[in-house]
Amino acid sequence: MRYWSLLFLVTAALCVGSFVYAMFDPNWWLLHNVSVRSPLHFGAEIDRLTMLVLAITGAVFVLTMLALSWALWKYPASPGRVAQYSHGNHKLEIVWTLIPAVILVFLAFYQMGSWADIKFRSRRPKSAPLAQVTGRQFNWLVRYPGVDGKFGTTDDLHVINNLHIVKDQAVLIDLKSQDVLHSFFLPQIRLKQDAVPGMTIPVWFDVDTPGTYELVCAELCGWGHYKMRGLLTVHETQAEFNEWMTSALAEQNQTQPAGATAPDAQASDPATTATDPASSTVERS
Ligand SMILES: [Cu+2]
């Protein structure tokens, strides 16, 4: 029954073929990357590393499947043939341990610079945080410091599931969690960071194309995890951003009784003054 080997070969060929096809069909491949041309362009860096790992694992997959199919073809079951049991081959074991170890060590060192740029706190932008983003079951609370530049004062702007930034600017945000682990995920910027209760984690990124992108939670955080979908709006200019900020503040103040203080994101629910934009359409191109 040596023809079984062909089944393995054809299946592997279909897998490789679908991968190659996917790279030329945007509907099959990664979402369009919008952190490519800005000064930080971490998105491009992550895609480059992903492709490198994919190339290495893909080459290993092809070689392994060729060897497997060859062995199945060459040594089929036949009457009178007895299997030989071996207790291992030290040379072979050393080789197949050393090769993956060398590849892993290479990848560990090769990506260190990118990891440092994206995650080391010493590399974060020197500017003040643009906003605080707090994950909680089950939405993202976003707080802007308002004109005084300070969080926790009465002029803060509170919005839900709605983060606004300006294109080509290195944005710094303070990421928090109010209850359990969440994960702040911007797929089109290739950014993912856990939000951990009790910690304030700085996150920085930039976007080169104005538009509206998805902000989702990538950590199964409870029954309503699927509802943690927000929008990242990237404005073309600072003036456009300021215009949005002014109108959002006006809308917030309109719904507050005279003399009321801004609600604290940690203690109460600012959802009453904010609209959830996640139901609108998201640009995916
Ligand atoms: Cu979540």
Image (tube, rainbow, N blue to C red):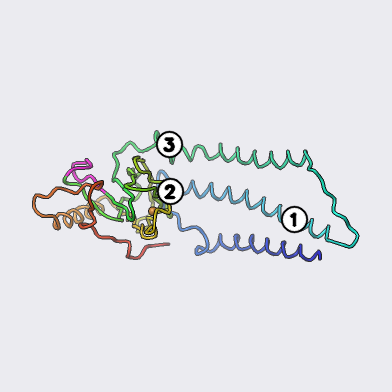
Badge 3: how crowded within 10 Å, few (<14), some, or many (20+)? few
SS for dot 3: loop
Q: Which residue is mark 1?
A: 68
Cβ of mark 2 under 8 Å from ligand 1: the answer is: no
Residue 66 falls left or right of residue 144: right
Q: Which residue is mark 3?
A: 120
Name the dominant secondary structure of the magenta segment: loop
Depth check, front residue: 198 or 6: 198
Q: Identity of the amino acid at label 3? A: Phe
Badge 1: how crowded within 10 Å, few (<14), some, or many (20+)? some
Q: Identity of the amino acid at label 1? A: Leu
CA separation in Å, label 3 and label 1? 43 Å
Tell me where the magenta segment starts and ends, as one range. 143-153
The residue that appears at 14% across and 54% down in the rendered structure is 253
Q: Which residue is mark 2?
A: 192
Quadrant in which the C terminus is drawn: bottom left
Is mark 1 in CB contact (under 8 Å) with mark 2?
no
Based on the displayed image, in which of its 4 quarters is residue 9 positioned?
bottom right
Q: Is residue 144 magenta?
A: yes
Residue 100: x and y in percent read 65, 42
Residue 151: x and y in percent read 23, 42
